[in-house]
Amino acid sequence: MDWASEKASSNVIKAVIQKKLNRECELLPVSLGAMWESVAQGDQDGMVAAWLPSLQAGFLQAYGPQMKFLGVNLEGTRSGLVVPAYVEIDSIAQLSRHREKFHRRIIGIDPQAGIMAKTEEAMAKYGLGEFELISGSGRTMTAALGNAVEDGDWIVVTGWTPHWKFAKWDLRYLQDPLGVYGGKEYIGTFARRGLAEDMPDVYALLKNFKWRPKDMEQVMLYAQDENTSYFQAALRWIRENDALVSTWLDQ
């Protein structure tokens, strides 16, 4: 998935597998649906990108029984509609009356992402039928956001925490009085059945993997340097956080 948050977590796992477990590790860029399906079918070993309990609830219901849930790897996530701080509204309920200033658009990401389905639900419940939800990717969303902030234009985007954009720009969530997006969520880890027997060290790493939003955000920020890949950012982070990484390993 082209999500900065999941590039951060997946590359940290890859870095630990290669540098601490001395194993090869390949990350496969796939869509959200393919991520769930491939682990459920045993084609891939695992994933650390399940935003639950609501954002990916449909995928959990469809594929969860076919794989092993290893636990929560990050707590305190949040999602919703996000605007620059200078935008003069506070609630999703106010979007409709200011639709022209927002060009009648909500800038989204991958059409399969759970936040897109939640946003379609929000549009229906808040009477935003005159808005268009623009699908794309995490990169196109942040590019549009950056351009708008530079020009001082009003823009509303699908947003989630942790994400580096909150460190780069002064942003805030719009209030959601109808509770469409829910409260704080978590990110879960899943593995294919049989991984514990095939690669017990990798299974233990995935089961023990737990970190904080500020850890994920640090990897994302390192990767914003145009000369730094997410894997290079992950390598730097595990060097700087060896004590935490050691708690993930089956000693």
Image (spheres, helix red, strand yellow):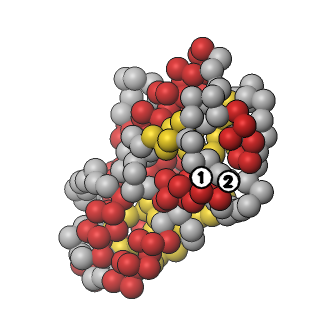
In the rendering, at what x and y percent does residue 243 appear? Answer: 56, 54
Residue for badge 2: 126
Is residue 160 shown to the viewer in this render?
no
Residue for badge 1: 123
Q: Nearer the viewer, residue 19 or 223?
A: 223
Q: Secondary structure at mark 2?
A: loop
In the rendering, at what x and y percent does residue 59 appear? Answer: 41, 71
Mark-to-mark CA distance, 1 and 2? 5 Å
Q: Secondary structure at mark 1?
A: helix
Q: Residue at x 50, y 41 (%)?
A: 132
Q: Nearer the viewer, residue 235 or 185?
A: 185
Q: Residue furthest front?
A: 130
Q: Nearer the viewer, residue 18 or 231?
A: 231
**Badge 1 local density, few (<14 within 10 Å), some, or many (20+)?**
many
- The reply, left or right, for residue 114 in relation to residue 42 is right
Which amino acid type corresponds to the residue marked 1 in the rendered image?
Answer: Met
- The reply, left or right, for residue 182 in relation to residue 201 is right
Is residue 39 shown to the viewer in this render?
yes
In the rendering, at what x and y percent does residue 49 appear? Answer: 44, 60
Which amino acid type corresponds to the residue marked 2 in the rendered image?
Answer: Tyr
Quick check: marks 1 and 2 in contact, CB under 8 Å?
yes
Q: Nearer the viewer, residue 48 or 131?
A: 131
Up/down of 68 relative to 126, above or below: below
Q: Residue at x 53, y 63 (%)?
A: 55
